[in-house]
Image (spheres, grey):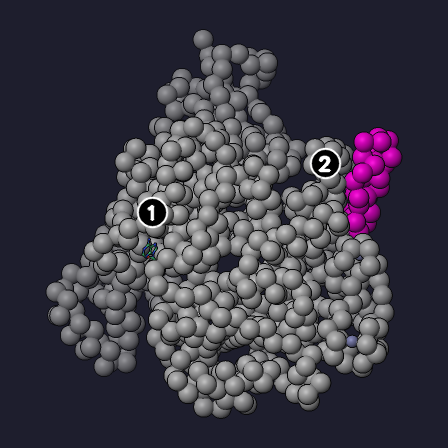
Amino acid sequence: MALYASIILDNPSPEIDRIFDYEIPFELLDRVFSGARVRVPFGGRNNIVKGYCLEVKENSDIPAGKIKMIREAPDKEPVLGKDMLLLAKWMKERYFTTLSQCLRIMLPAGIDIKNSEKTAFLKFERAEAEEEAKRLSSKKSLSAQALALNYILENGSAPVSKIIKELNISLSPLSTLQKRGVIGIEHKLIRHEFKDISIDQRETVPVLNSSQKIAVDTVTESFGKNIKPFLLFGITGSGKTEVYLKIIERVLSDGKQAIVLVPEISLTPLIVGRFKSRFGDLVGVTHSRMSAGERNEVWKRAESGEISVVIGPRSALFMPFKSLGIIIIDEEHEASYHSDSSPRYNAVEVAQKRCNLSGASLLLGSATPSVESFYKAQNGEYRLLRLYERAGNAKLPEAEIVDMRLELSSGNRSIFSRRLYSAVKEKLAKNEQIMLFLNRRGYSTFVSCRKCGYVATCSNCSVAYKYHYKGNFLMCHYCGQKAEVPKVCPSCGSKYIKYFGTGTQKIEEEVKKLFPQSRVLRMDFDTTSQKGSHSRILNAFAKGEADILIGTQMIAKGHDFQNVSLVGIMAADVSLNTGDYRGGETTFELITQAAGRAGRGTTVGNVIIQTYQPENYAVKCAARQNYEEFYKNECSIRKTMGYPPFSTVFTVIFTGKDENKVSEKTTDFCSILYKLKKNNGIYDNISVIGPSEASVYKVKNEYRMLLVLKCADENVLRDLTGKCLEEYRQKNKKTDVMVNLYLSAQNIF
Ligand code: ADP
Ligand code: ZN
Ligand code: ZN
């Protein structure tokens, strides 16, 4: 009797996101099972396409003569476990996406790549090879060989393809070195990890303090009980990572595995080193700079049980551990846990679901929890665990707020307040390092008064108006209301009202003018576009090759600079007035994180916050590092305005190269939406905001329109959104305009 398989094709199109039946040929009976990959003929031309088998069954509705045969099946064991298939189905519903897209991201991109790669390694004795490298370097004509040999000396063995790419050389210098016996080239298993890991040599693991102990005990006692997620809330340096390590120890001794998610930016050799020093070869690391083959290798080792702990960015969530004990998400508030390409999932939610399905625990950690998460902890959806003070001896830095309005009235028009200027001078004299920090890349988007701090704000939505250069007008990106740019300040009558315009470059120029002797590094999107430049700048600063580091939020996180004793926040206002409801939250988080950079070593740090809104609660609470007070303020505003967590907000984004078509499709979508709304009273409470142009309207030659939907009842909103998307997709099977949905108000208005 024949057996059949339910197949999902590996194709992102919503139209074919359904089960197709295929017959399993006799010779593939032991290779087709739930969670196996297959290749099948599809469509009129029977093109061979990839797919996934969901289940094997004895019957099919397709008549015997018509059903097609599976052609290939490469797997001996499922690549997708039962839990993962269930998780994918859940994600499809939750994120209004297709099953095939969810299944695809669960497997490493390089899964088809062979496990070995041509790898070059040293054959000469080291001293001999170094001699040889010197000899080669002295001859210009042999410089490519010298480069290659030096690379291998420095890195140990390395994939040939990688050497060729990074050094921009051809294969021939490597072949020559091989022929001469200096190096060998063989197919080897790939083992790529951080090469500059400093394994922590500390002999003793610190004895946990009492709040750390309570946290560890509470989490470990809950193992296997499948209860609520934990939120571990403690300032930077309060010992959260020590708590993670201790808990993982327990997980491993129970014979289970752990996944640790960290934001890519804090995935540094330092943190990886701490895990490696505790758990040695049981730890695997993934990060975006690894090749597909390298990532696949980690995935395979997780599947085979060779490693039991994986540290990585959000995609590490899908590691194929067979007996998962815990998922830990550090810095849970980070935006990078929201995927910005399809499927647009939220790693915290997906982690919670995965833990649910596999009986694992979930632990979220943060010094500045997202308002949504803290709200869940307050109303019992999460269990709150707290660490109260900095572990060890490091002191919290002292933060001062400088009122920039007073600078103007005393005749100082520089972007440096007198206080910050003298502090920089003092630290330079003491040979201590300084970080100057601009909360965002410096293009201005809002209009404010430099005399009184007034910000042009939409009266309907309590968010700052966005300034539009083209056309010189103001617009609210929530309700679409437009306004003129005021010539004088409506609040104090001063003429110092203009759009806010400080960029990192401008700060650099000013620093060079005011402190000509200082050595300056700048780190922002422009200076880090090249691969590797990011860590090059940070390493140079860590080594003391510069006195002042100027940067955006890239410099605010993760790194420990022992000699930094002053952090200057140039303009807290930039993140306060982003034109979305999360300005306060972003500001609090960025100031707190930036302040955490000062005084890491033995020196006491200073933090100076410059702002035109010194009375703002987010600025004030951040200066005092008082999260809870901030949270209370923030919640009362959100409640009044009906913003999350007191409502659910979805953002629909329309993108396309043809401006008219984008606008036309946006209108089409809206008419469907309004029609559905009119036909059913339950949708009355859904507010439709927009459509409006995204604040960065044109990106990579594509135009972007946004539509924001808001409702207190998430289920009602999901219902309408689902119906609307379905009808829209039915009517627009072939169009060049992409429609995407974010399950939140993304920071792109
Ligand atoms: P977080 O993850 O909250 O930033 P860490 O776990 O990195 O904090 O701890 C900060 C520093 O304090 C680290 O150097 C760590 O080794 C040290 N530390 C943590 N817990 C203790 C403790 N109980 N006793 C002494 N030092 C500790
Ligand atoms: Zn004013
Ligand atoms: Zn508005």
Ligand 3, image quadrant it occupies: bottom right
Q: Please state the extent of the stretch shown in magenta in the rendering.
A: 664-690
Residue labelled with disc 1? 245
Instruction: Assess disc 2: are there few (<14), some (14-19) or many (≥20) residues with their C-alpha within 10 Å of its C-alpha.
Output: some
**In the image, residue 603 lies at what x, y percent?**
38, 74
Secondary structure mostly seen in magenta is helix
- Check mark 1 vs ligand 1: CB closer than 8 Å? yes or no: yes
Query: Tag 1's secondary structure?
Result: helix
Q: Is residue 323 magenta?
A: no
The numbered mark at residue 52 is none
**In the image, residue 224 lies at what x, y percent?**
40, 29
**In the image, residue 625 lies at what x, y percent?**
53, 61
The numbered mark at residue 713 is 2
Question: Nearer the N terminus, badge 1 or badge 2?
Answer: 1
In the image, what residue occupies the spot 43% across and 51% down? 387
Can residue 167 be seen in this snapshot?
Answer: yes
Q: CA distance from mark 1 to mark 2?
A: 39 Å
The C terminus lies in which quarter of the figure? bottom right
In the picture provided, is 527 more to the left or to the right than 675? left
Asked if residue 359 is positioned above or below residue 486 in the image, the reply reads above
Q: Amino acid at mark 1?
A: Leu
